Each structure stands twice: as C-alpha cells, then as structure tokens.
Amino acid sequence: MSLLNKDFYHLSAGTIEVKSNTPNNVAFKVTGKSSHEKATSGALEGKYSDKSLGNTTSTSSLTDPKKPRKVSRRTPMRLVGATGPITIIPRSRKYNHGLDLFLTFDKQIQLVFRLLIRNRAAGLTLTQTWNTANALDTKIELADSLAKGLKAETIFQFLPASNNTGAKLNLTFKQSAFHGRAFFDLLKGPTANVDAVIGHEGFLAGASAGYDVQKAAVTGYSAAVGYVAPQYSAAITATDNLSVFAASYYHKVNSQVEASAKAVWNSKSGNTVGLEVASKYRLDPLSFAKAKINDRGVAAVAYNVLLRPGVTVGIGASFDTQKIDQATHKVGASFTFES
C-alpha cells in the first residue's frame, strides 16, 4: 500500500526532481539522488503522449462494475532500458511517423533512437529502436483489433556484436470485471508468466503463475483476495509459492486522517510475524505529515508541504527506537519543481 511506502524521504539523503511540460504533450523530468552511502545517481527523461490515441480502462471498474469506466487518452511510449522519448519529428494525421531520441544517465550515458509508425485505423503500432549498446529492438502492437479490450505485442531484439536474439509475446485482456495478462519469452526456456484478477461488487480475487516449458515445471505461483470500498480496503496475499502470507488494511477515517496496517508471515522462516502500521494527517490543503512504526521498533516520520505552485518540499527521518544511542538513524530531504 502506498500509505506504508510512499512519501517517506529518509530513504535517500537528498532528492531533487524537476518537471516541465510543453504545449505539444512532451514532458521532461530530471531526477537526482544522493544515497546515505554517498553514492549519487541521476536521470533525464522525456516522454511524449498522444492524447488522441489509446483506450485504457481504469482499474476502478473492477471494484464497481456499475461505475462508468474511465478512459485515458494518454498513451506514453515506453521502451525497456530507456526512460522515455523526446519527439523531434512531427507525426501525420492517419499515420504517426516520428523519430524519438532517448537520453538516460545513471553513471553512464546512453542514447536511444526510435522510429515509430502508427496506423490509427488498424490499431497497429510499429516501433524500431537502436541504441548505443548496438541493440536493435522491434516492437509490434495490435490493440482492440482481434477483440475489444485485447492488446497483443511482440518484441524482437537483436545484438549484432554477439548474435544474440530475443523474442517475446505479451497479451493483455481488459474487461469491466476482469483483467488478465500473459507474458511469453519464446527463446529463453521458453517461459510463460500469467496473472488474472476478477472483481464483483467490491470483491477481488487474483492469481499468478510462471511455467518453464523446457523443464515442464511451474516456476512460481501466488494468489490474493481482497475487498475495496470507498472508505476502506483489505487484502490477503500469498506469494512465493504460497509460503509468504500478508494481510493489509487501509482506512480513510475522514478527509484529514488515513490509516493503514500490514502483517507478513513467512512460513519458511518461523513463527515470527512482521507488523507495520502507518498514519497520515493532512494539516491543511497544502501540507501533510506521516508516521509509521514496525515490530522491530524502527519508526519513520515525514512532512510534505507545497511552498508555492510548482514547488514542493519534503523532509523525513527514521529512528531505531531499540538503538537510540547508536548511529542508525537516517534523515533525508526532497525538492520537487514543476512547471
């Protein structure tokens, strides 16, 4: 749950994030982080979204079939190994032709060039990429053509230097009360990973499994059940071949107070149950405070405030209440600038 994990700024010693959006739907983001181990990292991201394309169903339709399905017109073009595209050649009306440039850096600089051709009428998208690692990727997407809500994509990769090749097939099927996905690695194994979730009047049930065709063996499986209501939600999950069990609960007490708790038990490691509780309090429309503590006595606090439109500051700290006299505590800050 995001209440237990999000907006706790002690995880990094310092974080800065700068966001900018252009009138033609190109979003830029620059991120820099400094860890408590004195390691620094950064990333530059440019993402183009065509609002006139895409038909993404909101997951809220699973919890309430009677609720109108939300349709998102933003279709971000993402690529494994790159942060996002910057469109430098405009697209035509019927066929979207473009040349995209990816820039990323995290202790190294990488350039990725991508040629994109999209046929809106047929729901077909062809993406060809080439990066400075000398890897060639071709992705073909077909959405809502074979069946409404079905998206199929094939990804082919070729590394000329080593003659290594890769081929993957991904399927996604979305309906008002059912979401299912299947991922196939056709050359390695081949392997398959599938997951599905169904919903009815707030009740949810889902499962996932992996299968290695060459070994003729199931590589892993998980299951989950849950219930979602406007003011609260609860879920029970069993992962790692049904050996790790977790129960979580979220409650929106009122417009100012939220609370959440999670308990985890690993059947392979003993009878110890890990417990974590968190709460969020909105001080005013522009700021909030959060706190959490786990069964090991590690507590964390955070404060977030919007100084002015486009400028957000967050500070946080964690304390080991069992080792107050030792240097185990952490402090961090985050600065976000958005225009």
Image: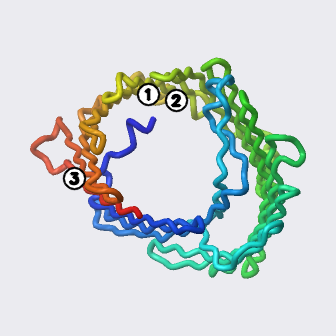
* Amino acid type shown at disc 2: Val
Give the Cα separation between the discs numbered 1 and 2.
Answer: 7 Å
Along the line of sight, the residue nearer the viewer: 249 or 308: 308
| Residue 155 position (above or below residue 65) | below
Residue depicted at 50% across the width and 29% down the height: 268
Q: Name the residue under label 3.
A: 331
Q: Which of marks 1 and 2 is nearer the N terminus?
A: 2
* Amino acid type shown at disc 1: Val
Viewer can see residue 297? yes
Q: Mark 2 and mark 1 in contact (Cβ < 8 Å)?
A: yes
Total numbered circles: 3
Q: Name the residue under label 1.
A: 264
Give the Cα separation between the discs numbered 1 and 3.
Answer: 26 Å
Looking at the image, is mark 2 or mark 3 nearer the viewer? 3
Where's residue 241, x and y in %?
Answer: 62, 31
| Residue 237 position (above or below residue 325) | above
Viewer can see residue 164? no
